[in-house]
């Protein structure tokens, strides 16, 4: 099984790769990451999904865990964040 963890600064102390047969875990931690950021696309999870690097990671991943939240709360209401998460899940399910 291959797992991918995408985190904001909460994942800064995690290793970037863990392997313990039969599991592998890739960890991508980005300071300031939000679910959606239309102004700084390098800090937007949704926009990251369109990058070649993320496409390659997702192709070989069985499960994804998101550790993101506090940066989004500064900019958006909870209603908006929930809709952003729905959009991300929809994107992943239809990929």
Image (cartoon, helix red, strand yellow):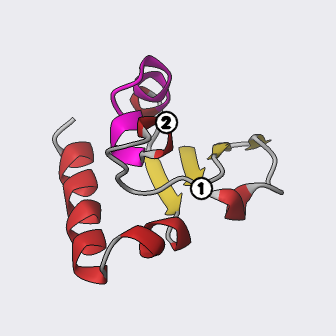
Q: Nearer the viewer, residue 19 or 26?
A: 26
Task: Locate the C terminus and report the quarter of the image it occupies.
Answer: top left
Q: Which residue is mark 2?
A: 42
Q: Are the residues flagged by discs 2 and 1 in contact, CB closer than 8 Å? A: no
The secondary structure type at the circle numbered 1 is strand
Q: Residue at x 59, y 54 (%)?
A: 32
The secondary structure type at the circle numbered 2 is helix
Q: Residue at x 30, y 70 (%)?
A: 81
Q: Which residues are magenta?
A: 45-57
Task: Locate the N terminus and report the quarter of the image it occupies.
Answer: top right
Residue 3 in picture, x, y percent from top left: 55, 47
Q: Give the Cα distance between marks 2 and 1.
A: 13 Å
Residue ranking furthest to the top: 52
Residue 92 in picture, x, y percent from top left: 27, 45
Q: Which residue is mark 1?
A: 7
Q: Is residue 12 magenta?
A: no
- In front: label 2 or label 1: 2
Q: Nearer the viewer, residue 5 or 33?
A: 33
**Res 20 seen here:** no
- In screen coordinates, is 83 left or right of 51? left
Q: Residue at x 73, y 42 (%)?
A: 21
């Amino acid at each position: 099984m291959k797992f991918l963890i995408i985190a904001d600064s909460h994942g800064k102390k995690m290793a970037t790769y863990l392997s313990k047969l039969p599991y592998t875990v890739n960890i991508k931690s980005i300071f300031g990451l939000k679910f959606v950021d239309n102004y700084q696309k390098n800090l937007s999870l949704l926009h990251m999904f369109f990058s070649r690097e993320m496409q390659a990671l997702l192709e070989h991943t069985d499960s994804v865990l998101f550790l993101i939240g506090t940066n989004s709360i500064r900019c958006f209401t909870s209603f908006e964040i929930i809709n952003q998460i729905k959009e991300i899940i929809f994107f992943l399910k239809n990929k």
